[in-house]
Image (spheres, rainbow, N blue to C red):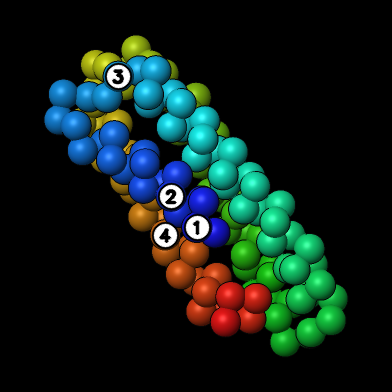
Amino acid sequence: MEEFQGSTSGFADLLQIEAGADHAGLIRERFLFAQAFKSHLVHEHAQIVSLSTTNATFVYEVMQRGKIIRELQGDYSAHVRYWTPQRISTEWPSYRTAVLALQTRLQRFMLWEEENLPIYM
């Protein structure tokens, strides 16, 4: 999880630049974030599957987790499609707002996982 949180932090650092980040750095950070998120999900998948099959108490939480992840992935994919390098350049403040909103949702999701799933307790 630390690698994943580090990638969100690196991306957040780029967003602090008022004039807009360089495109190469931005695309690199976006790619690293996507890879870290995928790795994070793969790493915990076996634990989550085991949790849902061995402990009926957590079946609902595991289903909720899956729903939230699908929503986040869909919204992130739509975000990447919408925010082309050209659009990022011309609409930097709006791009920053959109990224920060997605990161806030992701942070809330991670807190929810830590509070509701015993693999994090």
Q: Determine whether label 2 and label 4 are within 8 Å by CB.
A: no
Looking at the image, tell me whether mark 2 or mark 4 is earlier in sequence order.
Answer: 2
Residue 117 shows in this picture: no
Alpha-carbon span between mark 1 and mark 3: 25 Å
Foreground: disc 4 or disc 3: 3
Which labelled disc corresponds to residue 6? Answer: 2
Dot 2 falls on a residue whose secondary structure is: helix
Q: Say which residue label 3 marks.
A: 22
Q: Determine whether label 3 and label 2 are within 8 Å by CB.
A: no
Q: Say which residue label 1 marks.
A: 2
In the image, farthest residue toward the right:
53
Q: Say which residue label 4 marks.
A: 107
Q: Amino acid at mark 2?
A: Gly
Q: Amino acid at mark 3?
A: Asp
Which labelled disc corresponds to residue 59? Answer: none
Residue sitting at x 45%, y 44%: 7
35, above or below 58, in the image: above
Residue sitting at x 16%, y 24%: 19
Foreground: disc 3 or disc 2: 2
Position in image of residue 54 (x %, y %): 84, 81
Alpha-carbon span between mark 2 and mark 1: 6 Å
Looking at the image, tell me whether mark 3 or mark 2 is earlier in sequence order.
Answer: 2
Looking at the image, tell me whether mark 1 or mark 3 is earlier in sequence order.
Answer: 1
Q: Determine whether label 1 and label 3 are within 8 Å by CB.
A: no
Q: Determine whether label 2 and label 1 are within 8 Å by CB.
A: yes
Residue sitting at x 52%, y 74%: 114
Q: Amino acid at mark 4?
A: Gln
Alpha-carbon span between mark 2 and mark 4: 12 Å
119, above or below 23, in the image: below
From the viewer's side, name the closer residue of 72 and 40. Answer: 40
